[in-house]
Amino acid sequence: MNKFEQLGLSESLLRAIIDLGFENPTEVQEKAIPLLLEQDTDLVALAQTGTGKTAAFGFPVIQKIDANNRNTQALILSPTRELCLQITNEIKNYSKYEKGINVVAVYGGASITDQARDIKRGAQVIVATPGRMQDMINRGLVNISQINYCILDEADEMLNMGFYEDIVNILSTTPDEKNTWLFSATMPAEVSRIAKQFMHNPIEITVGAKNSGSATVSHEFYLVNARDRYEALKRLADANPDIFSVVFCRTKRDTQQVAEKLIEDGYNAAALHGDLSQAQRDSVMKSFRGRQIQMLVATDVAARGIDVDNITHVVNYQLPDEIETYNHRSGRTGRAGKLGTSIVIVTKSEIRKISAIERIIKQKFEEKTIPSGIEICEIQLLHLANKIKDTEVDHEIDNYLPAINSVLEGLSKEELIKKMVSVEFNRFINYYKKTRDLSSQSSGSERRDDRDGAPRESNNGGAVRYFVNIGSRDNFDWMSLKDYLKETLDLGRDDVFKVDVKEGFSFFNTDPEHSDKVMEVLNNVQLEGRRINVEISKNDGGGRRDHNGRSSGGGFSGGRSSGGGGFRGERSSAPRSGGFGPRTERSSAPREGGFGGRSESRSSSAAPRREGGFSERAPRRSESSSDTPRERRPRKS
Ligand code: AMP
């Protein structure tokens, strides 16, 4: 007799269990199933996700309901649509040998009419998300006044997501005599409050945190070219509009730089590193906890001891020097039974570290590709639609409705929806439709090899053209800049070409195989204490060799305006204020990021948003440009 047979389960359930391949009950099943089968009791079970709790309540509920009665007898509330569907599926699997049991999933984002029709046909078990359930109750589409069992799954998560009132309202429409089984990973005050208010002498069981810590974190890596690291980060943020993350960089300088770029590009980001004063760090952490910051860019040392729950993603912008440190980083997410994702943005030369980390964490990474522009647009569009749906209406607006109505008169509902969505979305799609695929080539077995010898991807199969923020103001001419680049990058005589020096910035080309090196090395070099900033330009600058250095083939079309940048079409990186996410330009607390995690507010003095892909961007340099020409030799820092 296996252990399931000792729990008092029916023959049909035991048959289903064999089909499922479950050999022995898990701890929560062993504790809960006999108890719930034998007694009509309320239950509080403290159990993490992944401990087998669906079966712990699913088996008893199936065994206890009356299949001959078509009334709804059990309601299972779960926090998310995914979990709702998952539970429904599991219950269907468990009850496959029971005749006449119908389970219906009720969740937002799908037709309420279809769900109501399915319920009308007779659903003894309803698995629902609180929001949609409340909606159905309000519309009289469901009757839960006769239920015998109410199960609150992942109660802490439901309350975390703001469903307290829905849950209270739903429970208030259920009979007092029912049994309530509450499953939760943690017991915060709100969960206790629900338990006190709606449960009668519940029996409590606690199971060991079988699935705590690392098992709640999934690990992903994205293989990109070094030059695309930052762009990849932005896309990952855009593909996760509700991201709440810690982004790890290796050095204080990179941390500061990445945070600055993100802020420039309009994300709710901030840096956390040891060069900040304690007061600055406290202030950053306060904003992070308050979720005004969605991307906290941090060094390992500074991030030590960050005890913020609900971090959705840890992003390894660069892998740590010591791969053991990876564990500390990824442990910032997946806390308190929450699921989290640890992302690594990795280049070909570092790919072997992934296997080493897998050995340490005893978990496999999933290789993923950076989402395409279209994918991001789809995600953002749905996010926007949901945001519109969930937006609470401030009735102050009622006063303006007559005027608004007269403006919008004549538009059909469909037209109106399209236009409303387009207000936000056009900027987004305009940017992303121009972007290229960022993923570096890799395939399963190859990915762990040292692929350094492999030819690198390039923008256009030809040369790679770069923009660099040093020029004639720094006492370079094309020849001295070429020499400087060759020396700094340790490249051969003909490896740097088409050097085009302007006053505050320059362009140059290399063959694609040098681009990783150019990006990594040059972005870590200082010139007279000033950071060098190099970026890939979209234009390859024309043909392969032209050493006169005076080529205008770089596509320079804007004419440099002093201090104002004014180059167009020369860079492939994302727009900052111009693209789709207005940058943060105020000192007050930012509102929740609207689109792609960007903050919505700008100071009234800020320039109007620019449309389209490229921004006019000032080369990064100190603006003390009244400098007289200086005699100085460029040097490596
Ligand atoms: P849950 O905590 O209910 O989400 O379950 C986590 C996973 O464990 C699901 O994929 C279940 O199908 C599986 N599972 C549940 N109970 C058992 C068991 N007794 N033996 C093996 N797998 C199980």
Image (spheres, grey):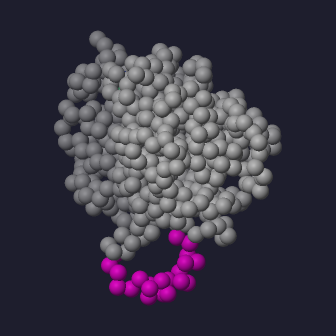
State yes or no: residue 397 in magenta.
Answer: yes
The magenta span reads 393-413
Instruction: Report the residue at 58% width, 56% height from top.
Output: 617
What percent of the width, then of the height, locates residue 190? 60, 46
Res. 499 visible in picture: yes
Tell which of 566 and 206 is nearer to you. Answer: 566
Tell which of 238 and 146 is nearer to you. Answer: 238
Q: Which quarter of the image is occupied by the C terminus?
A: top right
Q: Report the predominant secondary structure element of the magenta stretch.
A: helix
Horizontal side of residue 378 vs 203, given as left or right:
left
Q: How many marks?
A: 0
State yes or no: residue 336 in magenta.
Answer: no
Instruction: Report the residue at 31% width, 41% height from top.
Output: 88
What percent of the width, then of the height, locates residue 591? 62, 59
Q: Most extreme residue toward the top, as rendered?
A: 1
What percent of the width, then of the height, locates residue 486? 57, 31
What percent of the width, then of the height, locates residue 214? 52, 25
Res 276 quadrant in image: top right
Instruction: Report the residue at 37% width, 40% height from top.
Output: 462
Q: Which quarter of the image is occupied by the N terminus?
A: top left
Tell which of 629 and 57 is nearer to you. Answer: 629
